[in-house]
Image: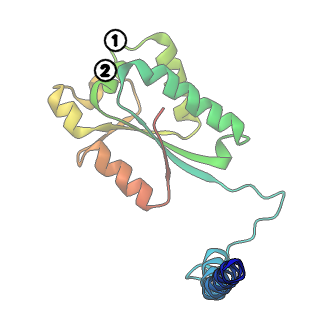
Amino acid sequence: MLKLLEFNQLALLEYRMRAKVAVVKLIQPVCLLAYCLLVFGVSGPLPVVAADEQIKHKVVYQVSDLEKVGFALANMRNHINGVGGPENVELVLVVNGPGLKGFYDAAASDNIRRAAAALQRDGVQFNACGNTMRFQNIETDELIPGFTRVDEGGVVKIAELQAAGYLYIRP
């Protein structure tokens, strides 16, 4: 009886080992295909960037909270500095919701004005959600200088930029 039990255990162990080998043989081609798609993609090999060549970032920042206005502008400044200057990055700011109140010309702090002006000099585009502007009953000339009204809405602008390859950051 003991010998029969040992034989059954060995047979079960051998069966499990063969099953594992069969699974590995099935998975190997799938893994190879996934690896090739990852490396070569659908449209060909991945672009090769020289070690000294910098990739120009394209980033859209969204600010919708009033208390995050100064923080977001500081993040954008740090981003520009972190990539070695404005020539290495394209930044777009899209402001909607309560965050727009931080850019009202009548209420903006001197720090916000200075930070926004410096970012605009570095090429950052400032966009205000047209829906928010209608809801808050405010016009572009009532915002600090440099804003463009986005009539289709801030979230639509963000989606369009993301479709065009921009990365999304919401501080």
Question: Tag 1, which secondary structure?
Answer: loop
Q: Is residue 68 above or below residue 132?
A: above
Measuring 48% from the left and 11% from the top, which residue is drawn there? 110
- Residue 101, label in figure: 2
Return the x and y of residue 135 as percentages of the image width and height.
Answer: 15, 30
Within-10-Å neighbours for mark 2: few <14, some 14–19, many 20+: many
**Residue at x-position 55% and y-position 41%:** 123
Residue 56 appears left or right of 65? right
Q: Which residue does the image show at 61% across and 83% down from the upper left? A: 23
In this view, the residue in front, 20 or 112, is: 20
Name the residue carrying label 1.
107
Frontmost residue, 31 versus 84: 31
In the image, residue 88 lies at what x, y percent?
A: 67, 48
Q: Looking at the picture, tell me which residue is in the foreground, 139 or 62.
A: 62
Q: Amino acid at mark 2?
A: Lys
Q: Report helix, strand or loop for mark 2.
A: helix
Gap between marks 2 and 1, in whole Å? 8 Å
